[in-house]
Amino acid sequence: MDPSNLTINYTGKNFTDLLELDWKGMITKKEVDPNSTLVFLDDHLHAFNRIAGVMKFGIRHVVVEDNYKVGEGATANDKRSTPKQMFHGEMWTKEGDWLFRNIVAYSEFPPLVPPILAAAYTGERKKAGGFMVAADDNKDIVHPMLRPDLNGDDMKIYTHIANTLGYDPTLADFESYMQFMNYNQICYLELLPYPSTLS
């Protein structure tokens, strides 16, 4: 968390849900600029509803950390509410069409490395659905940015990144495994400006 006095953390006793914040008031007081504010969703709630909810206040930039593919996810909402599901799930055609018409850009962030890099991890492995696992064919996940298993230069880059972040490049320990194999379902959406007359 940002320790400066520039950040208000709506956590603990100060908890306020994202959609219950006084967005209108903060925007009116110029405390928030909806054109440059980035909303980062990592709450395993209904991502589509939350994207639509912040869009009503003119928010233009959203990152969804749990952008699971159809039928996968850690919670019931994860399995039925992500942008990827809206675009690919036949049961969400209406929502997917609406989302597609209301975005300027949609980008998926590829995994940094393939699951084979976690071969040294001997602990309990997470199932496919947010985690990179060798059994998952990952056909609808963008290919990894680096292939340290196939390319020596990529191995140097990967090792440097892991060491800089304080993780074991072999991913043998739980924390290193979690950090590199877990956060691989991320997308960014740039939303169209919401007409002020509808706010």
Image (tube, helix red, strand yellow):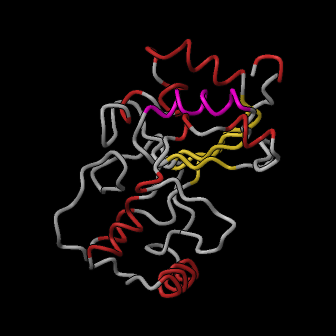
Q: Residue at x 59, y 70 (%)?
A: 2
Question: In the image shown, does 118 or 193 lie closer to the viewer?
Answer: 193
Residue 101, given in percent of the width and then of the height, sits at: 72, 21
The quarter of the rendered structure image containing the C terminus is top right
User: Where is residue 44 shown, x and y percent of the image?
Assistant: 40, 42
95 within the magenta span: no
Q: Which residues are magenta?
A: 46-57
In x, y percent, where is residue 150?
47, 73
The quarter holding residue 132 reads bottom left
Q: Is residue 197 left or right of residue 188?
A: right
Q: Nearer the viewer, residue 44 or 122?
A: 44
Residue at 69% across / 26% down in the picture? 56
Helix, strand or loop: magenta stretch: helix
Does 64 appear above or below 7? above
Look at 68% across and 38% down and name the residue there: 23
Q: Residue at x 41, y 67 (%)?
A: 180
Give the side of residue 54 with respect to residue 179, left or right: right
